[in-house]
């Protein structure tokens, strides 16, 4: 069962949630420094991380899974939130330039179907960032935050899932090196832990972010092509097959 939208809203309204938002947003800003004039989709519970971009984007849409529930978030054009299913997004093909998945990958019943749908609604050369709990980090085992719900992922697992859906992974980043504790949520401690973690143990972040591009020629199976060194025409040489046909005649 998914975390509800009420639980997620309460977490981000807390001191720990505010610290988590600041840490993840810092890394997302490095991946997406400017979204001016772009159409952006947030899947899951992505508003805390897309809020700062809302004034510069051409359009921002929030798609929230039905089991999670949705909050009526207002934008420049009215309500920008909709309820949806993982495998049936209510958008036309190639509708968005950028997609952010936050609190959407860990609890989906079928990650491949979800990523395939997101591939469909992303424009060619569009970007997707999947943000998920890191299985090697401390936050994946915490019951005090939504990052402890569902299935955590390693960086390689997310990259493999994106490749299998047709995306081309390009870069990854990590955040939430500070332990999941309210006592350690002060800005000074958070900044110190982030700098230490990024330098000393980058693989042990609480959250991993993987960015990928939609390339129409990317392999959808995730398997590498077999290199053919020379052509093969059968088990017997052509001359031998010709002589055998003459004997039969």
Image (spheres, helix red, strand yellow):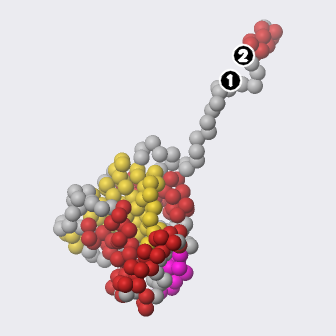
Q: Residue at x 51, y 58 (%)?
A: 159
Q: Which residues are magenta?
A: 137-144
Relative to residue 73, is residue 148 drawn left or right? right
Please tell me which of labels 2 and 1 falls first in the chain. 1
In this orientation, which residue lies closer to the viewer: 205 or 53? 205
Query: Which picture quadrant has residue 37?
Result: bottom left
142 inside magenta stretch = yes
Relative to residue 222, is residue 6 drawn left or right? left
Which residue position is annotated with label 1?
A: 233
Residue 84 makes an appearance in the image: no
Which residue position is annotated with label 2?
A: 238
In this orientation, which residue lies closer to the viewer: 87 or 189? 189
In this orientation, which residue lies closer to the viewer: 205 or 194? 194
Q: Residue at x 31, y 55 (%)?
A: 97
How far across and down, in percent of the image, does residue 123 sit?
Answer: 34, 50
Placement of the C terminus among the 4 image quadrants: top right
Relative to residue 180, is residue 249 drawn left or right? right
Residue 109 makes an appearance in the image: yes
Query: Which picture quadrant has residue 95?
Result: bottom left
Q: Looking at the image, which residue sits at the far left? A: 76
Relative to residue 34, is residue 110 drawn left or right? right
Cα separation, mark 2 vs mark 1, equals 8 Å
Query: Which picture quadrant has residue 227?
Result: top right
46 inside magenta stretch = no
Query: Given contact means CB atoms under 8 Å apart, are the residues at marks 2 and 1 in contact?
Result: yes
Residue 47's tag is none
Disc 2 is placed on an element classified as helix
């Amino acid at each position: 069962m998914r975390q509800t939208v009420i639980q997620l809203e309460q977490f981000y309204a807390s001191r720990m949630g505010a610290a988590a938002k600041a840490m993840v947003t810092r890394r997302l800003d490095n991946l997406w420094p400017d979204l001016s004039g772009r159409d952006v989709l947030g899947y899951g519970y992505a508003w805390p991380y897309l809020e700062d971009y809302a004034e510069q984007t051409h359009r921002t849409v929030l798609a929230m899974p039905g089991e999670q529930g949705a909050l009526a978030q207002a934008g420049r054009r009215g309500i920008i939130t909709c309820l949806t299913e993982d495998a049936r997004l209510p958008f036309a093909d190639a509708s968005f330039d950028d997609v952010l998945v936050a609190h959407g990958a860990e609890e989906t019943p079928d990650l491949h179907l979800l990523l395939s749908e997101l591939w469909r609604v992303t424009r060619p050369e569009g970007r997707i960032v999947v943000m998920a709990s890191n299985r090697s980090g401390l936050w994946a085992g915490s019951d005090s935050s939504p990052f402890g719900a569902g299935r955590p992922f390693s960086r390689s697992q997310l990259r493999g899932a994106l490749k299998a859906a047709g995306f081309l992974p390009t870069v990854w980043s990590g955040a939430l090196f500070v332990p999941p504790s309210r006592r350690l949520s002060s800005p000074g401690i958070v900044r110190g832990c982030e700098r230490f973690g990024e330098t000393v143990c980058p693989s042990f972040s609480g959250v991993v972010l993987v960015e990928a591009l939609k390339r129409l020629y990317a392999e959808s199976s995730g398997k590498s092509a077999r290199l053919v060194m020379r052509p093969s025409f059968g088990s017997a040489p052509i001359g031998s097959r010709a002589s055998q046909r003459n004997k039969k005649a």
